[in-house]
Amino acid sequence: MITTLGNGKHRVRIYTGGVEVASKVFEPNQQSQAREWEVTQKIALREQIFIKPVKGRTKFSAVAAAFVEAKDGVMNPQSLDAIRFATETYFPERLAKLPIGRITTPMIAQWYDELLAAGYQRSSVVRWRTAVKSVFTWAISQELVGADPISKTSVPTAVATSPESIRAMTYEQSASVVAGAAKRHGPYAEILEFFLETGLRWGELADLRVSRYEAIPRPYITVSSSASDGYEPKSTKSGRARRVPLSPRARDIIERRISGKTSDALIFTSRVGGRLNGTNFKRFLDWKTLGIGFRIHDLRHTAATRWLSAGIDVATVSSWLGHSSATVTMNIYSHYLGGASDQVALERLAAHRASVERVHTEAVEPVEMRARVQLSGAALELLDRG
């Protein structure tokens, strides 16, 4: 691209993948030389003999935009959108405006610390680190930068999730929310109930199929895929399928919805019969008002905390939620294991103690009765002798 500057000089910029890789300024009377140089560089790029790009001078934001453009149609759309979102939203503006070659390892480490200090989960920071690293890796392959400041860094281990970051509804709150939803649309209210009963993620419920429900020997669903809004289904977050048992209420909800449907049909659908969309779902229910400050995802947290508070062991809850390990569940919900669950444990201990004492009493009483019978028999014998 040739542009004429205010002083009459001509600036030639060479781009590849939307990124400027070379530029040169020519005098006002050198327009023909400028055109010749531009053509020569473009031929060199096409023939892959372009050796001297301007390394490190392009802003990170421009390189990230070029990366997304280059990978469009090549990379999984959802993964590409995630990288775009991470680099545009969570990568600090002060770094995005810098030439990519001036971003250093200490700058990246400081970025991690800032995110963690702001309350973001370590797993999220690791995801965003991966997104930024993808841009640097591509930039090196395109000879836009010579070094990767990401590889030498790691996200610090964060503390366990604080109680404030996990919000769970009380039974009264969830009943009120479900009742409010029922006034708008009964089937959507049942979807909220199903979240509360099963702890599913939004995408998992959105792609739940009839074939994944089994009623015998006991009702359960197999969760093996997830469909984020606007994307094709993929595997679950953990990459593994799991079985989630159904309560009587969850079973009632699901059996009404599968009646007359084919095995591959979606169990839960929008009001017009299509795939559920979270934005439309919340807009129709006026979730900002109805949800009383909770997110749809907090229904999952509510289910988990209720299970733990009822004394269900962590390993089982972890399996139902689809966590990669029980440790993950412990880190997220550890503060819920010290209250109601302690009370449940004490009640179970008391019940066990009462049971042992009852068995002991039942074992002792027959001995005492036999003693009384023997005593009565001896007394009768003495009377007979007398």
Image (spheres, rainbow, N blue to C red):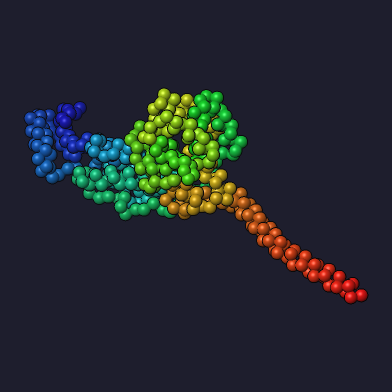
- Position of the C terminus, as image quadrant, is bottom right
Q: Residue furthest bottom?
A: 385
Residue 327 is left or right of residue 361, and the answer is left
Estimate the x, y position of residue 59 in percent, counting from the top left.
Answer: 27, 39
Give residue 86's quadrant in the image: top left
Count of numbered tags: 0
Residue in view at x 42 percent, y 29 percent? 260
Estimate the x, y position of residue 321 in percent, counting from the top left.
Answer: 46, 46
Query: Does residue 228 sit above or below 182 in this rendering?
Result: below
- Position of the N terminus, as image quadrant, is top left
Residue in view at x 53 percent, y 28 percent? 181
- In this view, the residue in front, 255 or 236, is 255
- In this view, the residue in front, 70 or 234, is 234
Residue 295 is left or right of residue 380, and the answer is left
Estimate the x, y position of residue 123 in percent, counting from the top left.
Answer: 41, 48
Estimate the x, y position of residue 153 in percent, counting from the top left.
Answer: 34, 53
Residue in view at x 34 percent, y 34 percent? 231
Query: Does residue 211 sit above or below 153 in this rendering?
Result: above
- In this view, the residue in front, 379 or 178, is 379
In this rendering, does residue 199 appear at all? no
Give residue 10's quadrant in the image: top left
- In this view, the residue in front, 126 or 333, is 333
Residue in view at x 55 percent, y 31 percent? 178
Query: Does residue 81 sit above or below 130 in this rendering?
Result: above
In this rendering, does residue 310 appear at all? yes
Give residue 249's quadrant in the image: top right
Residue 32 is left or right of residue 270, and the answer is left
Q: Residue furthest right?
A: 386
